[in-house]
Image (tube, rainbow, N blue to C red):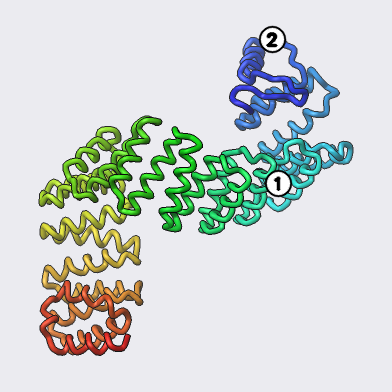
Amino acid sequence: MRDNFEWNENGEEHDVSKLIERFEKMLAEDDYFFFDVDELEVIIDFYLDIQNTKLAGNALDFANTQHPTCTAFRIKEARLMAYNNNYYEALEMLTQMEQIEQANEEIFITKGEVYSLMNKHDLAIEEYKKALETSEQPDELYITIAFEYENMNDYPNAIINLKNALDINPESNSLIHEIAFFYEMTGKEAEGVEFFNEFLDKKPYSKEAWFNLGIFYNSLELYEKAIESYEFAIAIDEEFSSAYFNLANSYANLDQYRKAIEYYEETFKYEVEEAITHYYIGESYENLNELGRALTHFNQALDMDPRLAEAYVGVSRVFTKDGKIESAIKYIEEAVNISPKNHEFRYELGVLYLKTDQLDKAETEFETIVNKDKSFVGAWLNYSLCFERKSDYSKAIDVIETAIENNKTDAALWFRLAGYLYKSGKVRQAYVFIEKALEMDFNRYPELLAYMPELEAESRFVELLEIYKNSE
């Protein structure tokens, strides 16, 4: 279907909405209008596509009454059977028709559709491949086959079929994005780069290919190459707002925040201003330590979208840097209310509670995080710190030991366990774990000193550092 029109096999164009309006008027008035075969096929397909099986059935009954010798409606009838879960009856009807019309691709396509509805995707693919032999739109069939492979979690074959479709229809932007999506979903960004570079050798003016190439370079942290790709996309289409936005992101990743701001603002020339763009502009100003401007854009983002949690977090960060902790807490609390499953937001809230000695509240936040994400080491450290601040070293040690059970190779946890043991008077045991942590990751010993700076003056600790430093 193209907008509100559909072409029949003779190249005639049908206004679908007018056909549907006329057909439903006939039903409502219990009248009798004439529709030719092509028109009725369009009407039936419309109802089947929106899965209105009742009206599809009405249209089929009327079609068979008005054109009783037309076999085309039997294929539509099989589709309707399948939509009503009568799969085997549909397949039996189609198989019978196949014996009579062996080269009718619609029969194979419909059988494929029935098998797909039955979740028999391998059989669906077999039928679609039969249809390929005579199809006038093989690119559409390759796309359909690709999605059957996706349903089987066979992404390599899905990509192969999408590439086949793109070979036939290289101007299809939707195909370019679908191929990019599959490469991204399977974590094969490097292969995506290779594919799009090869594609651009043949189609150098494809802005969508340059754009997706930029996305893959950005994912691989090759930001300069990403910038170059986005610039090619913009050279082809200077109003390509998404390319400006991604170009800005790449500059931000290179810490070139003024350039980032320039290109974020450039998007406003070509599309309606969006809250998230103002947020990123604010973040860039924040990174430049221009906190007033940062706050202005975070607030603009919130004016445009009061549910944008990231903007509340941005305001909170600015207030924290200004020493306005109570105001910072109010904003980060709102972000957590909007996005309660975002552990990063909850972590920042817990940190602010710790700073203001609201230990019970901090404990609740960190406990919530580690219950859901046992690999969040920072949350474990601060969760244990809540108990240490209450001088409950036994509980602090219990928490860290639980954290270590789930993150055995993280030296920070072992260093912190040593710190708690030391402060609770178990010095000999503490040094056992200090050595273990130094052996595990010598370079992280400053994390222990950040917690216990007094160790820097202790000769035994200094000697251990020399031993493990020399052993690296």
Observer-nearest of 195 and 397: 195
Dividing the picture into quarters, in which one does residue 110 lie?
top right
Dividing the picture into quarters, in which one does residue 75 lie?
top right
Observer-nearest of 234 and 28: 234
Q: CA distance from mark 1 to mark 2?
A: 38 Å
Q: Position of residue 202 (x, y in %)?
A: 63, 46
Task: Specify few, some or many for label 1: CA neighbours under 10 Å numbering under 14, 14-19, or 20 or more.
Answer: many
Give the mark count. 2
- Left or right: where does residue 399 sit relative to residue 54? left
Amino acid type, mark 2: Asp
User: Relative to 386, does residue 398 appear above or below in the rendering?
Assistant: below
Amino acid type, mark 1: Tyr
Q: Position of residue 271 (x, y in %)?
A: 39, 31
Q: Position of residue 172 (x, y in %)?
A: 61, 38
Which residue was labeled with disc 1? 115
Give the secondary structure at mark 2: loop
Farthest residue, direction right: 100
Residue 243 visible in the current orientation: yes
Residue 338 visible in the current orientation: no
Observer-nearest of 166 and 66: 166
Residue in the picture at 50% in, 37% down:
236
Which residue was labeled with disc 2? 31
